């Protein structure tokens, strides 16, 4: 009779409980504070070397991505880079992979990205312009993070994306951020 080393093999119960633990973590992310919930989500979703495009400034969000080792392409004012670097120093992560663009048009040479973060905006027109810029930059299987679900224009884009076959809703984080996954390649006309 051969001996089986069970110290490293997952038990039947742990394999059965894994989806339940995943659902519990997801439920906690839906109700918890955004910073902690986003860090928890990015631990699973963001990988070192991923390329992320962030449209609009949010220093804490930028630092959370940089803490995961991604290449962050930030579209914001020049002062935003200093703030991100300061937050990264507080978190103990490097801001060396940060690239700053002054406007959306100049970020066009970034190419295809693994994820896009759409920050809160002041109007539906700005959010729609950011979305149009971002939708053709995300690779198939990539993620789009939509911040601002508590605003009217954020809700409008959220509903539009839910009804679009090219996007699949993965998760809502803290009731503020929707994470969509790109399911289909969009055809350009």
Image (cartoon, rainbow, N blue to C red):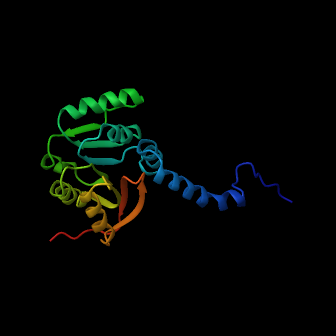
Give the side of residue 8 with respect to residue 24, left or right.
right
**Residue 109 percent location from the top left of the image:** 17, 49
Which image quarter holds the N terminus?
Answer: bottom right
The residue depicted at 76 percent of the width and 51 percent of the height is 5
State the residue in front, 114 or 157.
157
Give the side of residue 20 with respect to residue 132, left or right.
right
**Residue 76 percent location from the top left of the image:** 20, 41
Residue 22 falls in which quadrant of the image? bottom right
State the residue in front, 142 or 7.
142
Q: Is residue 58 above or below residue 127?
A: above
State the residue in front, 59 or 183.
59
**Residue 158 percent location from the top left of the image:** 31, 63
Which image quarter holds the C terminus?
Answer: bottom left
**Residue 47 percent location from the top left of the image:** 42, 47
Give the side of residue 101 with respect to residue 63, left or right.
left
Residue 185 falls in which quadrant of the image? bottom left
Q: Residue furthest right?
A: 1
């Amino acid at each position: 009779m051969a001996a089986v080393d069970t110290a490293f093999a997952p038990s039947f119960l742990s394999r059965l409980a894994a989806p339940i633990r995943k659902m519990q973590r997801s439920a906690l992310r839906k109700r918890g504070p955004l910073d902690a919930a986003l860090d928890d989500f990015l631990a699973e979703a963001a990988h070192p070397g991923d390329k992320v495009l962030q449209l609009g400034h949010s220093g804490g969000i930028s630092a959370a991505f940089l803490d995961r080792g991604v290449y962050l392409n930030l579209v914001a004012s020049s002062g935003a880079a200093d703030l991100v670097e300061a937050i990264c120093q507080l978190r103990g992560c490097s801001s060396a992979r940060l690239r700053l663009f002054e406007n959306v048009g100049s970020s066009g040479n970034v190419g295809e990205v693994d994820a896009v973060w759409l920050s809160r905006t002041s109007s539906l027109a700005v959010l729609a312009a950011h979305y149009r810029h971002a939708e053709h930059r995300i690779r198939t299987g990539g993620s789009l993070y939509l911040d601002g679900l508590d605003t009217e224009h954020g809700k409008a884009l959220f509903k539009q994306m839910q009804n679009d076959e090219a996007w699949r809703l993965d998760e809502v984080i803290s009731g503020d951020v929707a994470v969509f996954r790109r399911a289909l390649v969009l055809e350009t006309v």
